Structures are given as C-alpha cells and as structure tokens.
Image: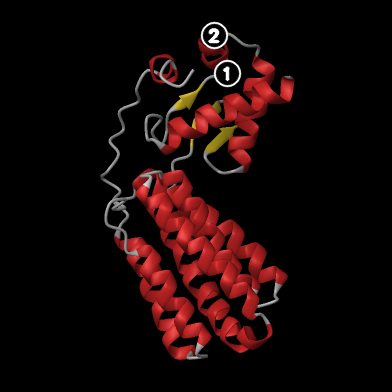
C-alpha cells in the first residue's frame, strides 16, 4: 500500500511536470505536497527521490526539491555528446546488421508504436518510444558502456524536450526520420546512416525554445488539485 501511494504521487507529479503545469524552478515543498495530498511526508519524500533519480526534479541540500531547470550550457553539452555517441552507434549498427536482423523488426514495431503515440497526442508516450528506438539501435553496437551512456543522455534530452520543446504532435517528422536511419543501416550505408542520424538530432535541437516557459510559478496546491 505504501509503495502504491508513493507510485501514485510520483506519477501525479511527473505528469504535472510533463504537461508543463509545474514549470522548471518550481519549489516542491514536502510540507505543501503532504498537506495538499493529505498524506504523510514519507511517500512524498520517496516520490521526490524517484523524480530526482529520473532528473525531473533537483534536490538541493538544506533548500529542498525543485523542478529541474537545466542551463543552456548544460543542454548544449549533452546534445554535443549525444551527437558524438549516436554517430558511433549507427556506424557499429551498420557493421552488425547482418548478425541481428531480427532486432530491426522490433525497431520497426516501436516506430509504429511511436506513430500511434503521436496520434494520441501524448508527449510522454512519444518520448518513451523515441528513447526505445535509439537504445535499440545502440544495442546493435554490442558496447555496454556506449549503451549505458546513451541511456543517460537520451533521458536528459527527453527531459529538455518536455520542458522546452516546440514538438509538433499533429505533424511529426520523427517517425519518418527513424525509418530513414533504419533503411540506411539495413543497406550498410555508413555515411548515409551517420548523416541521417546527425540531421535527426539537429532537428531535435532546432525544436528547443528556451523562451517557451516563463518563470511564472503557479500555485502547486491548485495545480495538483487537477491531478488528485
């Protein structure tokens, strides 16, 4: 029951963040959350720790928890590393395609799921599918260090998209770009696969808008009443 309550609070807060009701920099007071949700601080603290682990929340010692507020420099550095690692990942994927053809059927299925997520207009589902597609491609490298690094980097960039994206859920380019990358890997065209992956990630960067969110911290109690 305790874990169920923690999970419910975690999902509630995460959804409010993804929906941009709780904007970057918003203070998430344990006392306020406990009072609003009529629970003790223990499940609140556990939920905030989980959100911190997922990098949606930043916990500052002696100050408390805040919705994560990445700097422009941090975002640029993360995307720079992602471009470098995904470039290597598609190169290795081309080399290993013949050994793991069945993997591509799974990736194609996830791309179909991505299309359905766009149709449902659910940003969190879209980002989950995007994460899965890129990690499945990375797995073809058979390099666990690379895969784990990309897990962290893609998780971070998905959070940046949550906060600052101008993604077009009604007219997406991402599924076609994913299919194009896949086709280049299938024919072992390393240069084309690398070019398409870089174009794809640069397209993600171009959809970031740091002016999208004004620092207008809404009433947490009022916001969570919509989700409770």
The circle drawn on residue 2 is none
Residue picked out by circle 2: 35
The location of residue 168, given as percent across then percent down, is 28, 53
Q: Disc 1, disc 2: CB below 8 Å?
A: no
Q: Is residue 4 left or right of residue 123?
A: right
Q: Quadrant of residue 63?
A: top right
Q: Quadrant of residue 205?
A: bottom left
Q: Residue at x 47, y 52 (%)?
A: 127
Q: Residue at x 31, y 59 (%)?
A: 172
Q: Is residue 83 visible?
A: yes
Question: Element at badge 2?
Answer: helix
Disc 1 vs disc 2: which is toward the camera? Answer: 2
The location of residue 87, given as percent across then percent down, is 50, 78
The N terminus lies in which quarter of the figure?
top right
Q: Is residue 189 above or below residue 115?
A: below
The location of residue 113, given as percent across then percent down, is 48, 56
Q: Is residue 16 above or below residue 39?
A: below
Residue picked out by circle 1: 30
**Does label 1 or label 2 sit earlier along the sequence?**
1
Crowd tier of the residue under label 1, counting other residues whose Cα lies within 10 Å: few below 14, some 14–19, many 20 or above: some
Crowd tier of the residue under label 2, counting other residues whose Cα lies within 10 Å: few below 14, some 14–19, many 20 or above: few
Question: Element at badge 1?
Answer: helix
């Amino acid at each position: 029951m305790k874990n169920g309550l923690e999970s419910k609070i975690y999902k509630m807060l995460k959804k409010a963040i993804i929906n941009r009701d709780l904007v970057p920099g918003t203070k998430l007071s344990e006392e306020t959350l406990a009072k609003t949700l009529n629970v003790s601080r223990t499940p609140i603290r556990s939920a905030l720790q989980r959100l911190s682990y997922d990098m949606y929340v930043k916990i500052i010692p002696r100050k408390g928890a805040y919705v994560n507020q990445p700097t422009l420099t941090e975002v640029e550095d993360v995307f720079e590393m992602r471009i470098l690692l995904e470039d290597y990942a598609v190169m290795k994927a081309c080399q290993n395609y013949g050994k793991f053809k069945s993997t591509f059927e799974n990736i194609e299925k996830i791309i179909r799921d991505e299309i359905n997520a766009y149709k449902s207009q659910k940003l969190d589902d879209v980002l989950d599918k995007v994460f899965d597609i890129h990690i499945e491609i990375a797995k073809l490298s058979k390099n666990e260090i690379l895969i784990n690094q990309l897990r962290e980097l893609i998780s971070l960039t998905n959070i940046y998209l949550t906060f600052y994206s101008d993604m077009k859920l009604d007219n997406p380019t991402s599924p076609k770009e994913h299919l194009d990358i896949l086709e280049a890997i299938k024919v072992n065209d390393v240069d084309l696969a690398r070019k398409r992956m870089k174009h794809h990630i640069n397209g993600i960067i171009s959809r970031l808008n740091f002016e999208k969110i004004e620092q207008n911290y809404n009433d947490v109690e009022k916001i969570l009443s919509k989700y409770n």
